[in-house]
Image (tube, grey):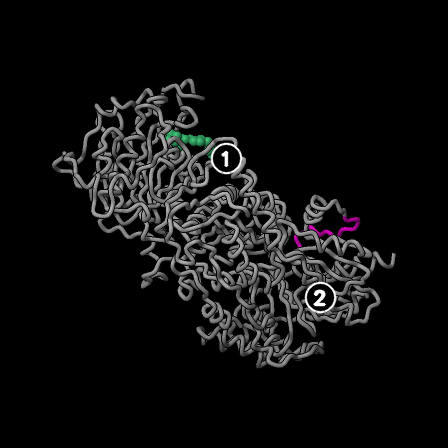
Amino acid sequence: MNPSEIKRFSIKFGGESGQGINSLGEILAKALKNSGYKIFGYREYPSLIRGGYASYQIDIANDSINSSSQFCDILVCSSRRSVYQYLRDLRPHGLLIHTLTAVSFKPEEQEFIKLNNIRVKYIDALTLAKEQGGNALMSNMILLGALSEIVGLDLAAVEHIVSEQFADKPKLLEIDLKCLKVGHELNIADYPLTYIKHEGWHESKIITGNHAIALGAISAGARAYYSYPMTPASSILTYLAETSHESGMLVKQAEDEITAAQMTLGSMHMGTRAFTGTSGGGFDLMTETISLAGIIETPIVLVLAQRPGPATGLPTWTSAGDLNLAIHAGHGEFPRIVLSASDFESAYSLIQHAFDLAEKFQTAVVLLTEKQIAEGLYNVKDLPQDLEINRYLLTDNGQTEKAGLRRYEFTEDGISPRWLPGSDLPQYNANGDEHDEIGDVNEEALNAKLIAKKRMKKIELIKQTFPEPILYGDNDVDITFVGWGSVKPVVNDIRNLLSQNNSDLKINYLHYDYLFPLKTEKLLEILKTAERPVLIENNYLGQLGHLITAETGFKFNEKLLKYDGRPFFIEDILNFINSSTNG
Amino acid sequence: MGSLCNTYFENENVSLKDYYSENIYTWCTNCGNYGIAAATKRALVAENIVPKDTFMCFDIGCNGNGSDKIGGYRLHGLHGRVIPVATGAALANRKMTVIASGGDGATLSEGIGHLVHAIRSNYNITFLMHNNCNYGLTTGQASASTRPGIPMNSSPDGTTADTMNFMNFVLSLGASFAARTFSGNVDQMTEVIRAGIRHIGFSVVEILQNCPTYNKDTTHEWYQNRVYDTIELNDFDNTNLDSALNISKDMSERIATGILYVNPNSVPFDQRLENRKGYTTELVDEVKSYNNVSQELFSRFV
Ligand SMILES: Cc1ncc(C[n+]2csc(CCOP(=O)(O)OP(=O)(O)O)c2C)c(N)n1
């Protein structure tokens, strides 16, 4: 299948940070969605407040989509830099709208425009906005009006969103609405949308992966969130703080990530549900706490929202480069669990499973996400089903018998009875020094061996509890992708596109939500007969691949790896399929 | 102070033996920690707090090696991190009496940021700072409170950084409760810890602790000859922060002890949370499904 056959329409807004690109994209996205179109939103922005270049892209398709295209059909630019940055992202016959009084294209750019039949349209948005009594920001309304006319979107749908958004500024709203109309009357081009409008779809929401995590946690009874701002985890903190009056959650911006992790551990130890979230740099600071949770067997839940490292790296871009970090963080040997979200639904559900698993196995659970998921704008209708809340405490069934109770009892399966401080049961020491069954310091060789064994036994049990990776697609296919994280929706969107196009080439995808400890039974079964297994990951090393090799000895001959801060676009995968099957 | 109060040993709901542990202490002979452990137990008994309602958090160091020599629920965490782990616990269940203990090494180095922000946030816990002016457990390195010119393990020519006055530092940050006591005076320590427990807010108790093995500079006798109780002063007002700051400065001639400062208008962190006003439950009691809340919040999205 050729990328030109992709049934999708993409509109991209480009500009500087601070030009209102984000709200421009948001308004159009909501208006499209309210008109029945299924969409996916993707934002790019630099790590600065003013300047640089930023974009907001909306992809539209007939079915649910959860991924972006690299290319777009309409590009709307309100800064010089963004014109040059994004020009080459236009598809053949694409439309470039810009607001620059004078643009001069280099010969190569002119060539590109000519070769691809790109249409270039200038809108003097600022003058038009000023004529309506508006300012620079309101020139965005001129563009929105023009755009809705171009794609055949009912202006009322846009007006509705704008009116809601600026309801508290009636004077400005009046000008905004005038600007919309003026833009709408410009009549500069025709690119009518030919996509299915879905009945009742206006009830769906446009919402990010971080909102999914926050809402999932609220629903699961998380009563405290301790965190320190770091993109792309920050919006969990922001949103939980903004909704803390409704939820009653204790939301604290801690002085650093060490504190955030320690406070979380303290609150979890006392018996509430608490969690923390950060990105790689902050997670580095949390590792000692994970190690402590391992030995005192106190549950803790940490969200690790990945962006490209090392160090500050690319703060506002995406990556799946911290699987190794999550698996290895913290000194010493102890069981831990690593899960990974891949879209809105899994983010909502997995944070709930994270609490459940942490409390069941009395250890640390890391939930991985990526900037692409954290800030990806998903178009969803309902929240997923909640997981039933279980606390796995000895006192759940009203235990009052104290005799023989040992908090760190050497049990058969490695899970010892847990009860909370404040219970009228034997008081124990949660001891970060090696200890015996009641928590007292013990440096004897035999005890050291027995308690290490007890803790490590949990690994087998966790593996048994974990679901196998999910296979999307049929068994008998040409290419089997294996991956985790945000690649899932991209590969699945490709699967759909291929079958819609009745393509001869068929793919399936084996996806890991539950990454560590790694389950390999189903994987090995599939690999036995897979025609062409391909590892796909948003990192350089192929970290899941390494883990699979370590566990099974299997080595992937083919890897599709991306590590430029950008998510996989559908074209990346199509091109891979095409180049490797044609050549 | 001074008169032995019999509720130190036996109270309505609890007696000293309830905090007893069979484990044998591993501190040096004449270590200040013996007195501190005794005073802590007495204070808890005198306040009629039963072990199941006590949560004691210990830092890493000689102080932390007492974590399994006392009753009550306990957590022996990481070096320098006792304050955040204890505050996280305290916020989850305010019915528990939370006491955090840490040394000067931990508190003034790895943990100093936590101290500063805990004072700002005024978390309702009691913090016992075991100030023996050195790193005891790692065999006598200098800490930030070691005095100049004293040869220590790893600084044979004395420290090259200036000495910190812990109490003065804490007061400069406006701690809502700040007391100083001496490990050789168990009665005063007991009373000061009791007051710290009763105080609603972040109670800092600096314990000038002798370390017979590694601190040959400020010994038990050295302190004994210099400490005085501010209660003996006629005109000392311990609700006046400036007076407290002033009186805390002298750490070489006459060393002020007792409750140096109490903010009568202390508002603890949990009472500062607008969104938690009106809640009578604890976070530990509130874990249940809030699906109605998440559905309502979800419905607000466009
Ligand atoms: C992260 C970390 N760094 C260093 C140590 C080693 N260590 C153990 S106790 C200690 C210092 C103890 O001094 P202090 O806090 O004054 O307590 P004391 O032993 O004097 O009571 C150090 C550095 C450690 N346990 N963890």
| Image-based side of B151 in relation to A4, left or right | left
Queried whether the magenta region covers residue B128, the answer comes back as no
Q: CA distance from mark 1 to mark 2?
A: 53 Å
Towards the viewer: A499 or A311: A499
How many tags in the picture?
Answer: 2
Residue B198, position as x, y percentages in the image: 24, 47
Which residue carries the number 2 mark?
A493
Q: Tell me what residue is drawn at x 27 percent, y 28 percent.
A: B251
Residue A19 seen in the current view? no
State the residue at coordinates (30%, 28%): B32
Residue at 34 percent of width and 49 percent of height? B123
Q: Quadrant of the C terminus of chain A?
A: bottom right
Residue A27: give x, y in percent of width and height: 57, 71
Magenta-span inclusion, residue A564: yes
Mark 2, secondary structure of its residue: helix
Q: For the magenta stretch, what is the residue range?
A: A556-566
Q: Nearer the viewer, residue A46 or A281?
A: A281
Q: Is residue B201 above or below residue B285?
A: above
- Chain for numbered disc 1: A
Q: Earlier in the sequence, mark 1 or mark 2?
A: 1
Q: Main secondary structure of the magenta part?
A: loop
Q: Which mark is residue A447?
A: 1
- Residue B62 is marked as none
Q: Is mark 2 within 8 Å of ligand 1?
A: no
Circle 1 or circle 2, nearest the eye: 1
Q: Are marks 1 and 2 on the same chain?
A: yes
**Which residue: 51% across, 39% down?**
A451
